Image (spheres, rainbow, N blue to C red):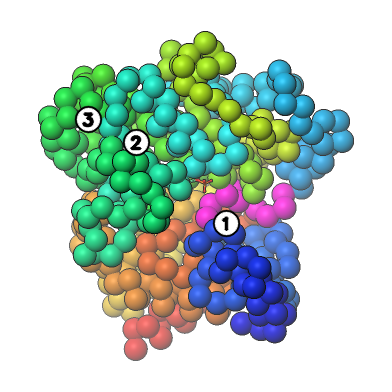
Amino acid sequence: MTSDSRRLAEVAERIIPGGVNSATRNIGAPWAWRSAKGPTMTDMDGNVYTDYHAAFGAILLGHADERVNDAVTRAITDIDLVGVGTTELEVEAAQLIVDAIPSAEMVISTMSGSESTFQAVRLARGATARPYIVKFQGGFHGSYDALARNVISAPDRAWKRDPNSSGILDDAVDNTLIAEFNDLASVEELFALHPEQIAAVILEPVPHNVGALLPEQSFLEGLRALTRKHGSLLIFDEVITGFRHALGGYQELCGVMPDLTTFGKAMGNGFPVAGLAGSAEVMSNFTPSGGAVMLAGTFNGNAVSMAAAIATITVLKDPEVDFYGHVYGLGDRMRAGLQSIADEHGIAARMAGVGSVFVPYFMDGEIRGYRDLLRNNDEASATFQRRMIEQGSFMYPMALKRNHISLAHTEADIDRTLAQAEDVIGTMAR
Ligand code: PLP
């Protein structure tokens, strides 16, 4: 790390815990950034990186996209935050979201994915008057206490309670049950153990917090049938998959309709905006509709967030832009390119992913669930991504982390990154 970045990072460390505003931003080196534009980000010393981290997937169109930034600027010359009633921006954003997400009849805006999953869980418990929530090993749903039982850590922790924070009361996680992804029997077992006590099953339809586990269609359909049979709600946490894999999220691709959908990250292309959508029947349990589940948030629906979401979704819908064609094409090129490099060098690797997301797993054999990922060579993953950063392609340097391609990336970017990967994988093979 070079001098100006180090200087700023050192000041940050003195006055911000660990020098970062979110724990996983600390990657063990003092990074500090001056700017981010299109597919690149530039550190304080002027080093330019092709960005595949994309702020954990919050960037979809490329950094500082003019269409989004101009829309935000225009909006805030007219209105910022009124905090009573509604605004044209809120109604326009809500309409775009309800039109886009197949299972959505009503939607609320929040400021983060964690608030959305928190609201979803509270709404599910309020609507069903039941305590338990089922989540899956490897799934991550944000920092809310009831869902912070994380289970994405080391092999010896698999299946043990793993609240990834002290300060979380046992009560908060005791009502969160863990099942195994792609294993319907593990969910059936929990329904049998806790009859009429499970409020909801929440899952990332593609668990991207451990890279890219692909859901089996029968598993998703089975969850839908099982939750319906037992009077529980099915919650798709589409905070990563939403808007990224299809305008209507992963539910559009798999055709399985959840009762509730959470989304966030990419929909504002870097601006803070998230939400929760669902059927009118379930969403009417919120207090403003006369229900009993509290809904509150000073900044919900503010002009910046709404304008950013409207502008981003408008670009995604534009057939001339062909966002999905572009990123799926580049994603395929990246995955195929990386796979053939690893194969040529005799390195055991699975270049996984969906559309714009690519994940280099360093392992062989079948990948169905979280347990399989315990076979990944975590050191090789971290080494690969760290060396790719040194070459100029920024990939979050930790095992099981995903990478993201944006609308601003080009074939030339992908090919340059593949040439760098050839060097990196070549040295790893030696
Ligand atoms: N849900 C999923 C699937 C996520 O990946 C995340 C964040 O990484 C969240 C929820 C929480 O979102 P936020 O960080 O905006 O609170």
Can you tell which mark lies on residue 222?
3
Dominant secondary structure of the residues highlighted in magenta in the image:
loop
Q: Secondary structure at mark 2?
A: strand
242 shown above or below 40 = above
In-image side of 125 versus 95 (left or right):
left
Name the residue: 21% across, 53% down.
Answer: 159
From the viewer's side, name the closer residue of 78 and 269: 78
Residue, disc 2? 202
Q: Mark 1 and mark 3: span between their CA atoms?
A: 33 Å
Which of the two marks, 2 or 3, is nearer to us in this view? 2
Disc 3 marks a residue whose amino acid type is Gly
Residue 278 at least partly seen: yes
Of pointers 1 and 3, the one earlier in the residue sequence = 1
Q: Earlier in the sequence, mark 2 or mark 3?
A: 2
Q: CA distance from mark 2 to mark 1?
A: 24 Å
Q: Amino acid at mark 1?
A: Ala
The residue identified by callout 1 is 55
In the rendered structure, does residue 61 fall within the stretch colored magenta?
A: yes
Q: Mark 1 falls on what kind of element?
A: helix
Tell me where residue 325 appears, x and y as whole percent: 54, 44
- Quarter the C terminus occupies: bottom left
**Residue at the location (53% across, 52% down)?**
57
Instruction: List x then y, in percent, for residue 178.
Output: 24, 44
| Mark positioned earlier in the residue sequence (2 or 1) | 1
Q: Is residue 335 visible?
A: no
**Residue numbers of the magenta segment:** 56-65
Q: Give above or below for 94 relative to 141.
A: above
Which quadrant holds the N terminus? bottom right
Secondary element at tag 3:
helix
Looking at the rendered structure, the kind of residue marked 2 is Ile
Q: Is mark 3 within 8 Å of ligand 1?
A: no
Comparing marks 2 and 1, which lies closer to the viewer?
2
